Amino acid sequence: MPSSFPPGDPAPPDGSLPASALQGMPQRPFSVYLHVPFCRVRCGYCDFNTYTLPELDDAAAPQGYLASAHAEIELAGEVLRQADPPPVSTVFVGGGTPTLLPATDLGSLVAAVRGRWGLAEDAEVTTEANPDTITPAVAEQLAGAGFTRVSVGMQSSVPHVLRTLDRTHDPAGVAGAVEALRDAGLQVSLDLIYGTPGESLADWRASLEAVVALRPDHVSAYALVVEPGTRLHGQVRRGEVPAPEDDDEADKYELAEELLGGAGYGWYEISNWARSPGRRCRHNLAYWQGADWWGVGPGAHSHVGGVRWWNVKHPRAYADRLGSGQSPAHAREVLGPGERHDERVLLGVRLADGLPVEDLRPAGRRAVAGLVADGLLEGRAAVRGRAVLTLRGRLLADTVVHRLV
Amino acid sequence: MPQPASTPPGVIRNFCIIAHIDHGKSTLADRMLQVTGVVGERQMRAQYLDRMDIERERGITIKSQAVRMPWTAPEGAQSSSGGAAGGGAPRTYILNMIDTPGHVDFTYEVSRSLAACEGAVLLVDAAQGIEAQTLANLYLAMENDLTIIPVLNKIDLPSAQPEKYAEEIAGLIGCDPTDVLRVSGKTGEGVPELLDRIVAEIPAPVGDADAPARAMIFDSVYDTYRGVVTYVRVVDGSLSPRERIAMMSTKATHELLEIGAISPEPAPTQGLGVGEVGYLITGVKDVRQSKVGDTVTGERRQATQPLGGYHDPRPMVFSGLFPIDGSDYPILRDALDKLKLNDAALVYEPETSGALGFGFRVGFLGMLHLEIVRERLEREFNLDLISTLPNVSYDVRLDDGSELEVTNPSEFPAGKIASITEPVVRGTILAPSEFIGAIMELCQSRRGTLLGMDYLSPERVELRYTLPLAEIVFDFFDALKSRTRGYASLDYEPSGDQEADLVKVDILLQGDTVDAFSAIVHRDKAYAYGVQMAGKLKELIPRQQFEVPVQAAIGSRVIARETIRAIRKDVLAKCYGGDISRKRKLLEKQKEGKKRMKMVGSVEVPQEAFIAALSQDGSGAEIAKSKK
């Protein structure tokens, strides 16, 4: 999640939700996100809500955090009790570096979710992991704790790029981690970052080829964004490292599509490719399809029935809220129909399935033909009544969204 | 004490203070009010010092235009012109202190204020020496045969160098350095001596008391409650209450609702006689009906010959003013109508720009006038404005013999041009001598011709140039300041016309001319302007979905070209649960931003790009770019 929150309305101390949000919950898919806000070192580019252990006191540090997270799951259970949510279809543990915690602790959180709402039979349960935290033993423990999928923060296979990103893992170790996870029966996603200052097109090609060689089930590739407040932002501002350049990132995106597509990975969202439709990340699809999810943990965002809220950021404040029986929500917003429409468009258009043209407002529908003419939307999909981005359109998705909303 | 309307001219002394903006004129004036007893000590602090704050904040003089002060000079004081003061006994004199506008653009107004006086106090900061503007006004005063009393102010400052600057002044006006008075407006030191000098040296006014009335208007101010207040100096005859007066330039007659003098507040009097200074209120609502320089006479017994020196204010610099928010147009129109009531030099007419929408073409006396008007419009009427590059007025003669006046690049004829004349000015630049080379280089590059150069002192030099006014209105001040580390000062006055080889450079975006960026420039500079503008716009205009050529052209001939490459990527790669609200809010903000986009053909140009491209300091470019 980003380091700065959007402005919002006050959230009620008991965490209660408007009846309108709870209505119809049993018919909608329900997911849970668990945020683990710890890292061994803080990377210079990262603006996620994460802390190194020396920054935190006991209540905020891992044991205290686990107790608070369990307390929030309890609170969520109470808030949603009347709504009768369905069994949880996906769980995603993100961070931070979730695997800094013992797999048994992560497992206890998954167990708590299961105990509260039940897990769907085919539930997808993912955790993020740093490659150097994955051993065959850890992989076995994660599988044993109910995880089905691990998203590995590989970022790059090129040592100087990893150094610029402050990543400490040995790129040679990624293969071992992938093998361990696969042996434990887990699906594997490899996450990459492109556009790092100093990364050449050849460096990026090397990373993509390394990924393809490892045959993961799923690949995410994100353009580096220099977020205000990060160390990298300061370095760019002072001219110590060059700022990422849009044209360079466009070249790299096109190369990713070429190499991943050539290796049999199909894009299903702007930054995500899967070896088959069954290996898409269903948790992330839930975000883009407007599903309900509860985000547990400091700074975590949630969405239920058109209400979005986000928790206080600091683990200490988070622990204090839950310790005194209060909701950790910092603020929330209740979306109106116009806002929900805009979100449907801006999220839906990012997907390979696109969005139904008939869901657009009249002005948006009228814009479709022009977007096809400009080479931003697929003509054949448009004829079938769906707005689907072309490769060029994927890179200019913001322009497309502006014209569709 | 002599009363207005019955004061013998022999005891009157009319003077003004010539000074640079922060050389302490207001402080000295306040001290004179205090020393002469016109304002009490408590009143001074409570009232006059407060007023000074407003004045300082606005940077323009809002003080009393002419104050009448009694002063009893000691035995022996007598006017050098002889007159009634001889005899040696202490005697009460009437000193009229007439304010002068201190701006480079208001030479004409200054000349009228000077014409109302017989003498001038030349006030120079003892720590800074004389500035170009002061020098220009000093020359003006000397040309008007005014008696000059040289004074160094702020002698209490530790950094004061009275010897050095007394020498400089002495060299300028041809007196002995010991004749230069030393005062401190702050402590009051030397002020009584200065008042004595004014009585002793400045001639008494001379006029024919029996002739038909003739009074010169030296200022005219609009007051919300009273209408126009007209400040006059009576030359011949007298004006009295309840008579009708006539303006000699327009023949218009007005009832005199009030006549009076200021000491220190306006107070009605029995009239004003020869040599006296005061104000008239006639109930007119527009300063154009009471023009500076005009001659007031009586309706029944009219003078036949107006006082010399009157002319209509003539705008020299033109610029388009456009509200950034198009719906503010009526507010801008009303605001200009209001400012016009108090600014006889302000002229404007509606203008429509393809790029900037509805606005006004406004004529100004000069760059400072432009800045003051713009600032007042923005501050007093809460308007956000874009102003186009200022230009001067050109006389264009076509091959077919017809002539036209061009004050806007859009009026520049496309047909065969036989000749173009442009206004030129005579510029005076004062600077430390180490900057001579830099200044000459600048003036050279601005098509200047050196008229002469004089050392005021071993370290300070005066350079005189003729320059095309068009070159001055185009960031000349800024260039001069940056090349002289802020030490140079400049003054200029109109000095005729010259023929010049001028062309109109158009700027095209994807083949469409953007009228707001067209400029009339010298042929030798057309290329530089084209390259600079095209380069600026390339930086300022966000990349579009297609490649956008930016061209500069003279007629159909392209002289410079840049290309804004097509945008390839605008999407943020990552959009997960915690990003959605932020992303949606960004979208909403960008939708708002779209409303501030102007379409030039099919190219979207943000308002900020227009503002930055039209700003002369170049700093706007960075701001707009970082906003992308």
Image (cartoon, rainbow, N blue to C red):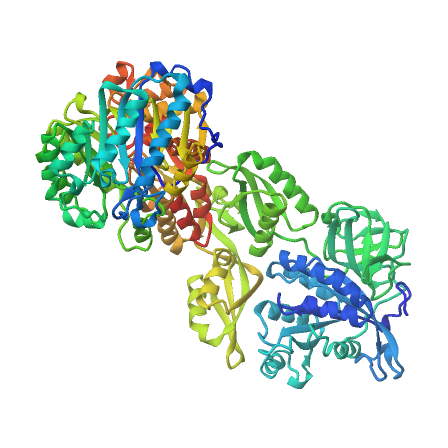
- Image-based side of A294 in relation to B92, left or right: left
Measured as percent of width and height from the top left, residue A274 is found at: 17, 27
Which image quadrant for residue A100?
A: top left
B315 left or right of B225? left
Image quadrant occupied by the C terminus of chain B: top left
Relative image position of residue B290 (x, y in whole percent): 75, 51
The quadrant in which residue A379 appears is: top left
- Residue B601, placed above or below residue A77: below
Residue at 28 percent of width and 20 percent of height: A118
Which residue does the image show at 59% across and 73% down from the upper left? B130
Q: Residue at x 44, y 25 (%)?
A: A335
Q: Is residue B563 left or right of residue A252?
A: right
Horizontal and vertical percent for residue B542?
36, 40
> On the rendered image, what quadrant is the N terminus of chain B found in?
bottom right
Q: Is residue A162 left or right of residue B237?
A: left
Which quarter of the picture shows residue A39?
top left
